[in-house]
């Protein structure tokens, strides 16, 4: 083959050979003109009604907790006593009096302490629910952002592949004129170009669909171009512990609240105490009166009242403990499964980078050398270049699949801000 034909082809090959390796962070220049993942997350957090509702619930629990361990309100009563029924006079009988009584009840045992603990647990649970909603929202936005990135990155690779095949087609036409390529070579290249055009249309369509879904969270910013490289949170392994996962924190708070209810139910076996102070205004010249008293409840029917409540609270606490244990094991198993898939993906990525692609490139170089020396076949070069391109597509797909797994792992392990 003519050396000039090979040189033009080599230029295109060098263009497509540039690896699409994700960097650790988007550049500041990109951040100003492109929809970064950080910007998408921030826009979603600011506009999501679910997060706002979760924050209101947390604030509501915090407000309610302020009075959870307070004593009941005192009671003030006013009564007329010993009014004669013959004339209903308030001044004829010295026994007639107006009595003002102030009373205060004291809940049994440590009821107030346990109510305060339950309220604090509800606040912690609401805070954990807010953190869970925040993580779920960011996970959804990351998936949509990555879906757009995936389709556009694969489309860019297809564009480079199409440029290569166009250059190969031009070279094949020139070689065909000097009987160094066959008509079937031209047919194969033209057919491949047609399929690439269809694949590009499909990728662009999927990218638009993903942008439309992303627009739900980020508005018109979804139409901005994305950075050319993946951000650090889609390339780096997160550091964290399942034990601090918000879902676990919420269940742990529910368990603490259930235990506080058990304590409150146990306290109901103690008597409730009431204190009363009264002042009586007597008619006529009789002196006024002062009275004081203490009342005590008698929990003598505990098997019908207090015991069933205690058993119910204990069953609820045991159920909360089981739910916590189960969810912790489920999330730990999910994290282990993701780590295993990441390890397999890393091995495959390394193999493609270090072995498969270099070997395929070496074969393609050898065939180009043979064609340049007049011994090779053009259809063999087409297949060799196709193998290199498909290997690069697979490498890119593996990296994107790895990023997708990191989204789920980060949901499980990402430290709570």
Image (cartoon, rainbow, N blue to C red):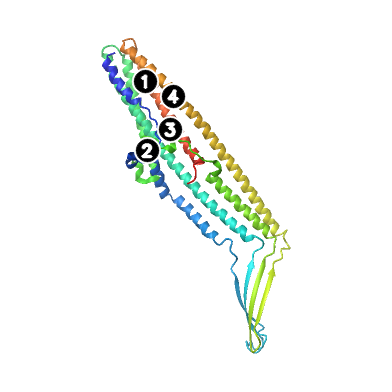
Q: Residues within 10 Å of mark 2 (few under 14, many from 20)?
A: many
The residue at the point 66 percent across, 53 percent down is 312
Name which of mark 3 and mark 1 comes first in the sequence.
Answer: 1
Classify mark 4: helix, strand or loop.
Answer: helix
The answer for how far apart the CA atoms under marks 2 and 1 are is 32 Å
Q: In the rendered view, would you say 377 is above or below 37? A: above
Which residue does the numbered mark 1 point to in the structure image?
385
Q: Are marks 3 and 4 in contact (CB under 8 Å)?
A: no
Q: In the rendered view, would you say 401 is above or below 297? A: above
Query: Which callout, 2 or 1, points to the residue nearer the camera?
Result: 2
Quadrant position of residue 384: top left
Q: Which mark is residue 26?
A: 2
Name which of mark 2 and mark 1 comes first in the sequence.
Answer: 2
Q: Residues within 10 Å of mark 1 (few under 14, many from 20)?
A: many
Q: Which mark is residue 413?
A: none
Name which of mark 4 and mark 1 comes first in the sequence.
Answer: 4
Classify mark 1: helix, strand or loop.
Answer: helix
The answer for how far apart the CA atoms under marks 3 and 2 are is 16 Å
The answer for how far apart the CA atoms under marks 4 and 2 are is 25 Å
């Amino acid at each position: 083959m003519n050396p000039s034909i090979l040189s033009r082809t080599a230029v295109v090959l060098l263009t497509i050979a540039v690896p699409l390796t994700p960097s650790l962070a988007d550049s500041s220049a990109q951040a100003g003109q492109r929809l970064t993942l950080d910007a998408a997350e921030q826009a979603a957090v600011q506009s999501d009604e679910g997060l706002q509702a979760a924050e209101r619930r947390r604030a509501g629990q915090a407000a309610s907790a302020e009075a959870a361990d307070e004593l009941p309100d005192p009671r003030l009563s006013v009564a007329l006593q010993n009014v004669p029924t013959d004339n209903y006079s308030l001044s004829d009988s010295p026994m007639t009096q107006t009595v003002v009584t102030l009373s205060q009840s004291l809940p049994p045992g440590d009821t107030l302490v346990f109510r305060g603990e339950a309220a604090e647990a509800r606040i912690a649970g609401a805070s954990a629910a807010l953190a869970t909603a925040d993580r779920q929202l960011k996970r959804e936005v990351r998936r949509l952002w990555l879906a757009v990135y995936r389709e556009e990155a694969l489309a860019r690779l297809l564009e480079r592949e199409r440029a290569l095949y166009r250059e190969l087609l031009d070279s094949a036409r020139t070689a065909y004129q000097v009987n160094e390529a066959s008509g079937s070579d031209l047919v194969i290249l033209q057919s491949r170009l047609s399929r690439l055009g269809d694949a590009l249309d499909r990728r662009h369509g999927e990218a638009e669909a993903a942008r439309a879904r992303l627009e739900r969270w980020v508005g018109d910013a979804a139409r901005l171009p994305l950075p050319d490289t993946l951000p650090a949170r889609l390339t780096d392994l997160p550091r964290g512990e399942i034990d601090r996962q918000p879902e676990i924190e919420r269940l742990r708070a529910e368990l603490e609240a259930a235990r506080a209810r058990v304590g409150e139910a146990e306290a109901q076996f103690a008597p409730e105490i009431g204190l009363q102070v009264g002042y009586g205004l007597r008619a006529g010249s009789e002196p006024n009166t002062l009275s004081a008293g203490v009342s005590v409840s008698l929990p003598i029917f505990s098997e019908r009242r207090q015991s069933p409540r205690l058993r119910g609270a204990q069953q609820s606490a045991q159920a909360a403990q089981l739910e916590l244990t189960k969810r912790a094991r489920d999330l730990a198993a999910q994290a282990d499964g993701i780590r295993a898939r990441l390890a397999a993906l890393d091995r495959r990525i390394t193999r493609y980078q270090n072995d498969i692609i270099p070997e395929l490139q070496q074969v393609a170089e050898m065939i180009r050398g043979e064609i340049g020396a007049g011994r090779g076949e053009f259809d063999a070069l087409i297949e060799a270049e196709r193998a290199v391109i498909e290997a690069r597509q697979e490498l890119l797909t593996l990296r994107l699949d790895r990023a997708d797994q990191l989204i789920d792992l980060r949901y499980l392990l990402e430290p709570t801000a």
